[in-house]
Amino acid sequence: MIILNEQDRIMPMYLQLYAALRDEIRSRIRPPGSRLPSRRRMASELSVSESTVDGAYSQLLSEGYIRAVRGSGYYVCEIDDLITFRSDTQPKDSDISHSGKIEVDFSASRIDHAGFPYNQWRKIQKNCFDELQPELLSSPPVQGYLPLREEIAAYLFQARGVHCSPDQLVIGAGTDHLLQILSFILDSHYSLTMENPIYLSTVAHFERLGHPVHFVDLDDQGLNADELEGLSHTLVYITPSHQYPLGFSMPISRRIRLLNWANDGEDRFILEDDYDSEFRYDSRPIASLQSLDTAGRVIYLGSFSKAIAPSLRISYMVLPESLLTLYNERYTAFSPAVSGFEQRVLAEFMHSGAFTAHVNRMRKLYRMRRALLVDLLSAWNDQIRISGENAGHHLLLTDLRGWSEDELCRCACSAGVRVYPISRCFHGELPERYRSTVLLGYAGLEPEEIRKGVSRLKVAWKLHNV
Amino acid sequence: MIILNEQDRIMPMYLQLYAALRDEIRSRIRPPGSRLPSRRRMASELSVSESTVDGAYSQLLSEGYIRAVRGSGYYVCEIDDLITFRSDTQPKDSDISHSGKIEVDFSASRIDHAGFPYNQWRKIQKNCFDELQPELLSSPPVQGYLPLREEIAAYLFQARGVHCSPDQLVIGAGTDHLLQILSFILDSHYSLTMENPIYLSTVAHFERLGHPVHFVDLDDQGLNADELEGLSHTLVYITPSHQYPLGFSMPISRRIRLLNWANDGEDRFILEDDYDSEFRYDSRPIASLQSLDTAGRVIYLGSFSKAIAPSLRISYMVLPESLLTLYNERYTAFSPAVSGFEQRVLAEFMHSGAFTAHVNRMRKLYRMRRALLVDLLSAWNDQIRISGENAGHHLLLTDLRGWSEDELCRCACSAGVRVYPISRCFHGELPERYRSTVLLGYAGLEPEEIRKGVSRLKVAWKLHNV
């Protein structure tokens, strides 16, 4: 018995009828093969219009509950039983992030928020979102929007000595995404050789794609090419400008030895991750490894996360010719991952000069914050040592009295301050010389926060002034 | 002999000195181990200030060309020879896209550009880009911005009957990116079972990650679960709402058999790609397969490429509990791939109701365009057959006279019209019954373009009116 409610303002009559018939079919009240009443008869039985029945039947038809037999009518289809039909489920509350008593967070991934040129970005955004640009809503090329690649190529040449044509640039949705692409295009017998310590999550994509992963321990100048002898079909991943997390830069001698090592075999590549190269404070930025490469052995990787905002998921890599060929063969059938619209905005932000001006302003600001932090910490020069402070957004602090990383982090935390362990960047055991070392980022902290953080740390760590 | 030019307005003195010394070191005029003159002496020799020498030395020091020995001075480091130093290379011209005489392009991937609510989007963008929102510039969660996931969950329930909590939603940078994630989190012994025909590029990620790939030929109701008997540890990829490219929707009987097949084993999943489900013209959208799933076997995949714009690289998937656990274990250490800012704009676009209004408007528009195209083509009903026209952005045209796909495409092309082959969607040989079938998209074409295209096709294909 089908009951329809004409007063129902949410569900139109034809849908009520559709749902009622559907349920009768599902529950086998109308068994497979049985014939439905003609439209006219059904309409008159239920005192509804024929168009209501029409709507219900056509919905049942398109979902495959019934089939039409020309000149004969509608018949119920053969449908397997579903064990049960889905019942409504309560959406779960999403995890509540653990309540933070942390008042000062020396995170290395934060940037300064107040200094962002909001008005300029808004204006460029508005201008770029122009309905008269026919390609605005279309999918961008998988390799990236050409004017953006041109801007990045020009910027890289000027700022980092990187030689590349826009053709060699691949735009990706963050560094992890570019590593996915890279490990996708390389044959799986290529291994990945990583600095140890390193940002460890980068390893997983390579491992999952079947690439063997090796680690090479660093001395205080970075990676030593001697350790690579005998390796072939390998991609050496390094952060030469500002080693993460240790903070030093690789001296030119090491760089050249590494390049010469790579030049010795067709099957050796160096992946230079220049993640925060815009921010070098005590001397000019060191020329990139890529700028010294004459044989197409270096893949250069960069990102706008530090220089603009982590919210903007745009990174890029420069591929040498041989890998560019592989990329074109193996990857260009995929769809792009970076918003075409945001690529336009960024291209215009760079083209207008606003990007360079912003980076220069931020460099000044971060230099001041770093100086303040270093100055304040220097009061305990005999108890702590600072290192890796020449560039980027973080420095390392080593407790010369021998407190462990864990003690340092825990005591800071109980005083409302977060400092970061570096042991999780090490593959294998934490070397003895780093057991008392923690990482402090400063770029996202106002001067008063830095002061507050340091004075809390003094108490928490029981430091006494010189 | 070092010559510095005080008049050089581009390169400051200290950099000129740095470059000159660097070249002397590289060319071994200053051999490894040799001592550099003291700062005072160098300054007086060159008649420059000590601070100029200071700047040059500190740059050489930071790049590792020289080292400082306390109380003794600066010494040249041991540096391997690089075979040659890089010479400037001419950037290559980027490929010129092949000149198009195509005047009407029946592409299925185009959307209507004029109908986009530019003003609303601009306004939302401006409002969202608010410097008072502290998280605006920060990296979004890797799974996606929570308010966006909430909007999508509500939309999916209302529009597609999909039951999910925002916790089950994963936001990705396009469908290919979500497939990368999915194949990454699944163990590699999971195979992928694909409809044949299908959009073939989706296969590559699974193959590259070591998943075996099977194909199942479709009959005219879509995939038949009988063909899957015996398969285990498999993910069945289907487009039940509007098969790509054939255009039909899977009847409920097939859907339920497929679900019952999946329910028979812990290790069977169905990947439902609902890529253009917003656009169904002759009846209500068919409820999704996911809405019938009671056992957590269906992964639901959707995208904003058709409903908003291909330029916006935002897609989403709904993971059943068991896969959500794997995702949380295996993927959350990675960084997100979708701009936090664009996720905010989209969330607000949905929240304001503008999304639903836009989709409704577009559905009406596309329905009209489809009707026009179908009407115009109907003049040759005895020579051609139309199919797959009930939904989406494209339909299929079959030449009943038996012209081949290749002839149809080539003759259209020489008349300035692009229609699309479907053979490239087939794994293996094109079945005989599709040898005269081509694909025509219509969503991105104005009525006058559709008229022009059809009248050109009439001549090119030698069709005569009934």
Image: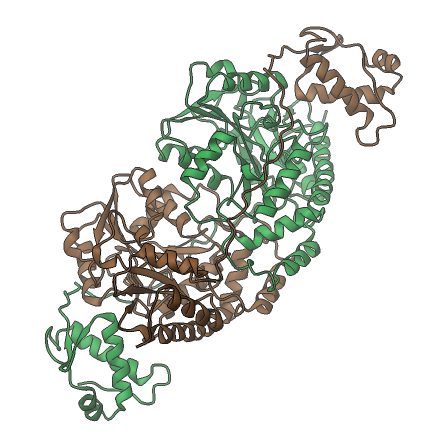
Chain colours: A green, B brown
Residue B151 image position (x, y, % from top left):
45, 64
Q: Is residue A446 visible?
A: yes
> Looking at the image, which residue is at 15% across and 67% down?
A79
Residue at (68% x, 58% y) in the render: A123
Q: Which one is nearer the viewer's eye here, A280 or A35?
A: A35
Q: How many marks?
A: 0
Q: Where is residue B255, by image quadrant?
A: bottom left
Q: Quadrant of residue A439?
A: top right
Q: Is residue A93 visible?
A: no
Foreground pick, A239 / A287:
A287
In which quadrant will I find the N terminus of chain B?
Answer: top right
> In the image, residue A32 lies at what x, y percent?
11, 73
Q: Please provide percent x and percent y for residue A171.
A: 53, 43
Q: Position of residue B205 (x, y in %)?
A: 35, 42
Which quadrant of the figure contains the C terminus of chain B?
A: bottom left
Q: Nearer the viewer, residue A199 or A95?
A: A199
Query: Relative to residue B27, is residue B271 drawn left or right?
Result: left
Eyeballing the image, is B85 above or below B258? above
Viewer-side residue, A100 vs A128: A128
Above/below status of B223 relative to A337: below
Asked whether, in this view, residue B282 is left or right of residue A461, the answer is left
